[in-house]
Image (tube, grey):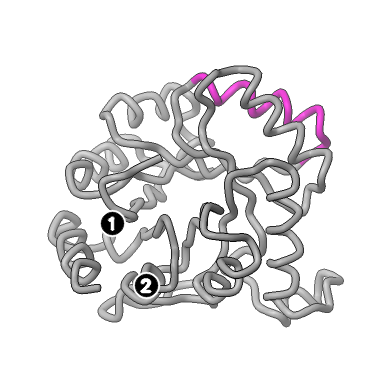
Amino acid sequence: MKYKNPIFVALDTSDLDQALAWAIAVRSLVGGVKVGLEFFSSNGAEGLKRIIDLGVPVFLDLKFHDIPNTVHRAVGEVVDLGVSIINVHASGGKAMMEAAVKSSKDKRHDPPLMAAVTVLTSLDENDLVMVGQATPVVGQVERLALLAKTCGLDGVVCSPNEISHLRKVCGDDFLLIVPGIRPRWSSSGDQKRVMTPKEAYSLGADILVIGRPITGAENPTSAVERIVEELNTI
């Protein structure tokens, strides 16, 4: 799937009017927008359709993670809304991911791209130890990414730090969606594994998910234009 550019703006708000305003401000400049749990929990499918109807590609970031049958049904409910990308947690396992892919393909002949979340960008190795995964982050990310590829998913959501490694082990056709993107002129917020847009794109990221540096800017349009200009110098 081809996009105008790799930037997807994270509409991280429960306020429908605010999300619409952000999407309208940037839709002519970006590859798409990301809608997550905060927005969907407040506005549901009707609110999501308002964003989709703007004509901008939408990454629905709900991170499905449940027993296979439940995920199969849940994915089926959102596929027909017209989103471009859906994700699940790779840690849900092989059967769950396969159920998600099957549901998506059964519902539409042109299903949305399906990506798996590997390790959240808010986690580091100390966090993994506390939840019983005493392994380096990159090892866990590789294990989950290869499992997702085996299950027929199109790609993964990973941190900037894993881009180069995953390109080597998963190949050039495997979609890499990368949050934790922060221009040098913005703060890192609560993300622990971050990188600039230019650095991440140069390493091989396909989609750069960027939120607060754009939505928190006094002029979101100008912030996007600044990032696009930086990317065009690659």
Question: SS for tag 1?
Answer: helix
Q: Picture coordinates of residue 204 (x, y %)?
A: 44, 66
Look at the image and say whether residue 58 sits in the magenta stretch: no
Q: Which residue is mark 1?
A: 215
Residue numbers of the magenta segment: 66-80
Under mark 1, the amino acid is: Thr
- Mark-to-mark CA distance, 1 and 2: 24 Å
Checking the image for residue 202, the label placed there is 2
Q: Picture coordinates of residue 7 (x, y %)?
A: 32, 55
Residue depicted at 25% across the width and 73% down the height: 234
Q: Picture coordinates of residue 192 (x, y %)?
A: 54, 77
Under mark 2, the amino acid is: Ser
Which quarter of the figure is the N terminus placed in?
top left
Q: Picture coordinates of residue 215 (x, y %)?
A: 28, 56
The image quadrant that residue 73 belongs to is top right
Please tell me whether the stretch drawn in magenta is mainly helix, strand or loop: helix
Earlier in the chain: of badge 1 and badge 2, it is 2
In front of the other: 33 or 233: 233
